[in-house]
Image (cartoon, helix red, strand yellow):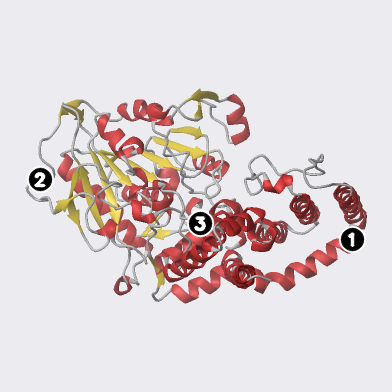
Amino acid sequence: MSKETEQYQDWINQLGQFNQQVTQAFMSNLTPGAPAQASEITQALMASLSSNTDTWLKLQQEYSQKQMELWMSFIGRTPGDIATPVIEPEKTDRRFNAPEWQENPLFDYLKQYYLLTASWMNSMAEASELNEDMKKKLVFYTKQYVDAMAPSNFVATNPEVLKLAAETKGESLTNGMKNFLEDLQKGRISMTDESRFTVGENVAISAGAVVFENDLFQLLQYTPSTETVCERPLLIVPPCINKYYILDLQPENSFVQYAVSQGFTVFLMSWRNIPVEMNKLTWDDYIEQGVIRAIDVTRDIGGAAKINTLGFCIGGTLLTCAQAVLKSRRHNVIQSATLLTTMLEYSDVGDISVFVDDAYVAKREAELRDGGIVKGKELAMTFASLRANDLIWFFVVNNYLKGKTPDAFDLLYWNSDGTNLPGPMYGWYLQNLYHLNNLVKPGALKICGISVDLGRITTPTYLLAAAEDHIVPWKTAYASTQYLGGKCEFVLGASGHIAGVVNHPAKNKRNFWVGGGTTDNPDEWLENAEARPGSWWVHWVEWLRGHGGKDVAARKSLGNDEYKQIEAAPGRYVKVRCD
């Protein structure tokens, strides 16, 4: 054996060990509750198996027959032959797109063997006769395991990785180890070339200034770009678990710049990345010192008795809670509310419900009740686990096994720029909203000392959901129409939690549905709705103008005598990272 061959084999062995470490590390993060629940799930599954033998036997027979077909196809095949596949990946599955997976009989066999086994395991989980919660956990954790064990995730069984290693004489493997060690220091996977982006230089660059700040947030006011504006300003409440600039990425996809260009005076909250010394902040603090304070300052600077508001994701939940408090105080200062991919009703939160069970919530709430910090990295990994193939394993293969630098993508840069949250606030949110669904129960919650009743909120509301949202299922978002007391305009956008929201009209992409009528059934609403091409932004602007009041001359200066400019946008708070 030549020295070069020995060196290459050594690299393969090292990468194999490294590969196991990577897989174990990410599996433990992807399925944090699995070990503790494994015994309970297994016992329930065995009981289901004994009472439903016909279904299990049928699935086993079908699986064995397909595997025999695959084996017979493999042993009769020579290199270069293209055989008719026994099973093919789904169209959205990009793990096996490279020609090496089809052209080489061995790797084609491995791919199909895996796909058959994955289908069988997922079908077994789906066919189990368990209670709803237990079955959801079994289906979720089975998929997590199946995705992690794909041959594409391992050096020795990925022909693309082996080919690249040979072509680069091991350099790709060296680069992969370097990438892994760098990410280990960060405590997260690099999903984009982060060196290509700087907040305030090529993302979050809309012109404006910080006109107010306290320990919890900075308030940005943006510079008008039209001669006249609607008299009522617009206040945006972004999520507090990520930075605000998802709504102000770059000029070609900035929601903020678009709103300004349509003649609205835009204010926006920039939440602080919570430091350790602020680890006792509560949900009430986020309402009183956060949203309500921002509303007051926006009204004062804007010189308007009432303002329009917009909340995105948990920002929409915070905004709605603030509305409920203000309504009880008889402060009718909100003309309209827009809620983007927001949950108010939490009976169906999608796959994330597998984490939010009695044991987990009780444990976390006890840990965080008296203080603590919830790391943005923890939250990011939890949400990424809901789409593990796209947001975890793709980058494991690309960055570590192939040794590549990920592409520059502004949205994924934002996705990796999370914020830390105070423990009491997060624990309260988990317990009272995600777990107990108390927000929609009149009088079940007290916020800022006031009993909350969403039915008393009579503000006109524009509700946007996203059809493929894995964080806020669209039918759950639709349920808000049944609890708010005012007139609701429900709109369903195409795509997911972020891409369904950030869709500039100039790109003329996707579509949205409107006008499904008044019904408590989301499926019935969709059946009656009208599909329109392009971006929902245009439809929203038309709706918001109806609540904007008369046109007035745009102000030439930002802030006012009481609230003077502190610094240029995007401000200091947004630049503080969790790393």
Q: Which badge, 1 or 2, comes first in the chain's sequence?
A: 1
**Helix, strand or loop status at disc 1:** helix
Q: Which badge, 1 or 3, comes first in the chain's sequence?
A: 1
Q: In which quadrant of the rendered view does residue 16 lie? A: bottom right
Q: Quadrant of the N terminus?
A: bottom right
Q: Give the percent coordinates (x, y) of residue 228.
A: 17, 27
Q: Mark 1 sits on what residue?
A: 51
Q: Mark 2 sits on what residue?
A: 560
Q: Identity of the amino acid at label 1?
A: Ser
| Residue 361 in sight here | yes
Badge nearest the viewer, 1 or 3:
1
Marks 3 and 2, how far apart at CA: 40 Å
Q: Nearer the viewer, residue 478 or 206?
A: 206
Q: Residues within 10 Å of mark 3 (few under 14, many from 20)?
A: some
* Residue 488, numbered circle: none
| Residue 289 in sight here | no
